[in-house]
Amino acid sequence: MAETAPRFSGPKRVFSGVQPTGNLHLGNYLGAIRKFVDLQEDQEALYCIVDLHAITVAQDPEALRAQTREIAAAYMAAGIDPQKAIIFHQSAVSAHAELAWIFNCVARMGWLERMTQFKDKAGKDSERASVGLFDYPVLMAADILAYKATHVPVGEDQKQHLELARDIAGKFNKDFHAEDFFPLPEPLIKGPGARIMSLKDGCAKMSKSDPSDLSRINLTDDAAMIAKKIKKAKTDAEPVPENVEGLKGRPEVENLVGIYSALSGQSVEEVLAAYGGQGFGVFKPALAELAVDKLAPISEEMRRLQNDPAFLESQLEAGAEKANAIAVPILREVKQIVGFVV
Ligand code: TYM
């Protein structure tokens, strides 16, 4: 795994973000939000709701506002404590957008042209994609570096974006002879849950944008829906294998076993030792029970919190104030380094 620049002497600081684009799912939870909860204990942590990123594709304004509150509710329902970690929405801290502009002048076209997520999201008609969608990873770099964050918990799909953030930090430091000004942020990806796949296709990642709702478990699904989706999940005619070797070439089975492992805290080997040789008529109900057990309290608490939009907004405002207090002096230093009159 990539290392933080050895000479950066600032504090260890965690930053990550989630887009308020609806359909928060099990992949978001296991790949990101659950890690956020653990990381808030040991160092300063900022968890952003990236509404500026959300508008890189068209959004309904009212839905965007509601979804922003929904992510705030999900963060808190999952166990993020606003007294320990800073929860806020990106548009409330203008340093993100300002630093992104400066980074636009540091990043190279060729770097962005290599980003696979842009190619996937823009599809064949990239001429019609917004400039913002192309620039998305530069704004991500600004999100992280506006706080000189050193560690970034994300799912596997964000790896390339994190490499770009490191490249931008390194080039800024070099171009402006500001050695070690920005840390080279370290991605925290490893662990079960880093890449949760679709319940319908073990080779496609579980995604908010999959047209089939049966492909994902949403954090807002109730117990009956979770059980139904797991029951309908794609598998094959063979029983659960007895060892890891037996998962090869069976991506859907590997995914379900991986989800069990991530939710239970058991290793994949332990899960296979318990269920190897059994049919999916046994394994799927066990997985459904486990998933309901872990997720139902979160969705219940999310629903409760969402009934109080004023409370959620007050938490976001308080978080934005704390985030601004960190980012404003850093941005001021950046402006000084770049040569702006400050
Ligand atoms: P978003 O909202 O698409 O995803 C939020 C987080 O969920 C992870 N994730 C997954 N993890 C495992 N399996 C999956 N199937 C799965 N799908 C999504 C993502 O990796 C992510 O960690 N670009 C970011 C948001 C962002 C950001 C940042 C993150 C904006 N600025 C700065 C870190 C630092 C994104 O993908 O959001």
Image: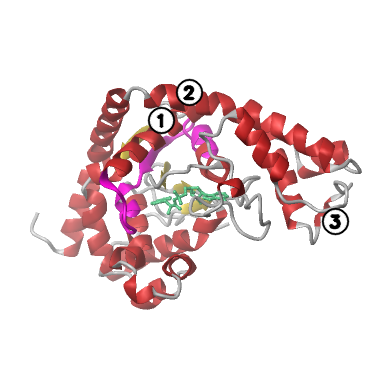
Q: Is residue 98 above or below residue 295?
A: below
- Quadrant for the N terminus, please: bottom right
Q: Is mark 2 within 8 Å of ligand 1?
A: no
Q: Position of residue 229 (x, y in %)?
A: 65, 41
Please give the residue where the numbered disc 3 appears in the rendered image.
245
Q: Is mark 3 within 8 Å of ligand 1?
A: no
Q: Earlier in the sequence, mark 2 or mark 1?
A: 1
Q: Is residue 126 magenta?
A: no
Residue depicted at 27% across the width and 24% down the height: 310
Q: Quadrant of residue 204?
A: bottom right
Q: Is residue 138 above or below residue 268?
A: below
Residue depicted at 83% across the width and 51% down the height: 244
Q: Secondary structure at mark 2?
A: helix
Residue depicted at 38% across the width and 61% down the height: 137
Q: Earlier in the sequence, mark 3 or mark 1?
A: 1
Exactly how many numbered labels are in the figure? 3
At label 1, the amino acid type is: Ala
Q: Residues within 10 Å of mark 1 (few under 14, many from 20)?
A: many
Q: Position of residue 259 (x, y in %)?
A: 68, 42
- Foreground residue among 295 and 94: 295
Q: Quadrant of residue 217?
A: top right
- Is residue 145 visible in this depiction of the protein? no
The residue sitting at the left extreme is 341
Left or right placement of residue 97 versus residue 118 in this view: left
Question: Magenta residues?
Answer: 34-61
At label 2, the amino acid type is: Glu
Left or right placement of residue 284 versus residue 245 in this view: left
- Is residue 154 visible in this depiction of the protein? yes
Please give the residue where the numbered disc 1 appears in the rendered image.
73
